[in-house]
Image (cartoon, grey):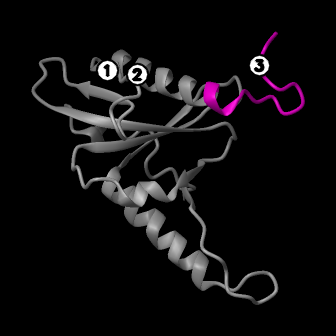
Amino acid sequence: MPTRSRAKGKISPGLAGTAGEYLVAGELSRRGYIASITLRNARGIDILVSDENARRSVGIQVKTSQGEKPVWILSQKVESMDAAENLFFVLVVLNGLGAPAYHIVPRQELVRTVSASHRRFLAEPGKRGQARADSSIRKFSDPDGRFRDRWDLLGLG
């Protein structure tokens, strides 16, 4: 029995996350890099990737969205991740059964953007003018496609 919901055309969040990781690893391999998916024991890193000669390597965290818009729901944890310069987020839009879209964002840029966006959200009054309650939910979006297909940002050559 397929796990894709017929009503919404979506798969379970766990399968979507796994699909995103394998799609990113496959795309990196297609581009000539060595990509290895971690075994869930590498905190904050889903894929380790290096250039063909292993001169430069980076860690990648993958986040996957099943919608068609470049918007990802993240957790507050992204703001407190270690300040590793060689950590990147590859944000995947599954686009149903069409070709996925990839948005490559350096960790520092993602944290800066998410934090500023959340501060703005908290500063705005709610629907009835009340102060907004803080939550652990964060959002990142790339409406202008600034990070779309920016594999060059990985600095792997």
> Is the stretch drawn in magenta largely helix, strand or loop?
loop
Q: Is residue 109 left or right of residue 52?
A: right
- Toward the viewer: 35 or 154? 35
Decide which of tag 3 and tag 2 comes sooner along the chain.
3
Q: Residue 68's spot in the image, x, y percent?
A: 68, 41
Q: Are marks 1 and 2 in contact (CB under 8 Å)?
A: yes
Determine which quarter of the picture holds residue 34: top left
Residue at image location 48% in from the left, 26% down from the top: 21
Q: How many other residues sit within 10 Å of disc 2, few (<14), some (14-19) or many (≥20)?
A: many
Tell me, for residue 3, which label it has, or none.
Answer: 3
Residue at the far right in the pictured view: 7
Q: State the extent of the magenta-drawn residues as a range.
A: 1-15
Element marked by disc 3: loop
Q: Amino acid at mark 2?
A: Ala
**Would you name the residue on which mark 1 appears?**
35
Q: Amino acid at mark 3?
A: Thr
- Which quadrant, please, contains the N terminus? top right
Decide which of tag 1 and tag 3 comes sooner along the chain.
3
Tell me, for residue 25, which label it has, or none.
Answer: 2
Residue at image location 74% in from the left, 88% down from the top: 130
60 shown above or below 120: above
